[in-house]
Amino acid sequence: MTTADQLVKTDTPMAVAKGIKECFSLLAERMNATHIEYTEEISILNIELSKGRWQNVRGFLRKRGNHDFVVMMSKVCSLDEYPNIDWKNLLERSNNLKYCKFVVHHDYLEVVASAYFDNAPLDYLEQVAHEVAHTADLLEHEITGIDAQ
């Protein structure tokens, strides 16, 4: 059994991962997703959801104080193309989410979550990635009617 296999099966904290690439590579194995190395600092998980839909979740590390956090984000839609967002509905929906919140980033509505990286178990990070992907995909479908990835 390889070290990666052991990490995937034992939910060892991510402190053993050397960065976002290794973290997302391990998550991709565990989630049967595709890992894409976008840049040195950003990795992407392409996660298969129900009904043949897919959603990209990009991740990067951000330092806060003395700790690293993994930030996971997924685009929903361009605000230029879909300016009539029901913001009240989004705020109400956020009450039912465990990890995510809605943000506007570079004129896109996005779903974002962050987690303490240093000792987060893989199963926890998997749950966070799933919620980001599922929430973004659901909103994308409701707002745009398409699967834009």
Image: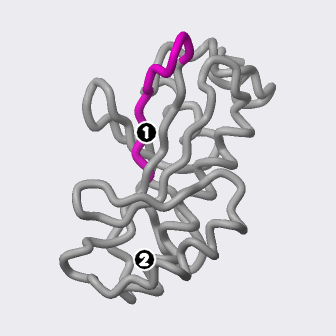
The secondary element bearing badge 2 is classed as helix
Q: Residue at x 65, y 51 (%)?
A: 99
Q: Estimate the x, y position of residue 117 in percent, counting from the top left.
A: 60, 24
Specify the quadrant that holds the C terminus: bottom left
Query: Looking at the image, is 127 positioned above or below residue 121?
Result: below
Specify the quadrant that holds the N terminus: top right
Depth check: 126 or 101 in front?
Answer: 101
Is residue 115 shown left or right of residue 59? right
Which amino acid type is marked by label 2?
Answer: Glu
Q: Residue at x 32, y 72 (%)?
A: 77
Q: Which residues are magenta?
A: 57-67
User: Which label belongs to residue 59?
Assistant: 1
Q: Estimate the x, y position of residue 127 in percent, counting from the top left.
A: 69, 49
Q: Estimate the x, y position of residue 124 in percent, counting from the top left.
A: 72, 39
Is residue 5 shown left or right of residue 17? right
**Mark 1 closeness class: few <14, some 14–19, many ≥20 residues within 10 Å:** many
Marks 2 and 1: CB-CB under 8 Å? no
User: Which label belongs to residue 140?
Assistant: 2
Q: Residue at x 65, y 39 (%)?
A: 125
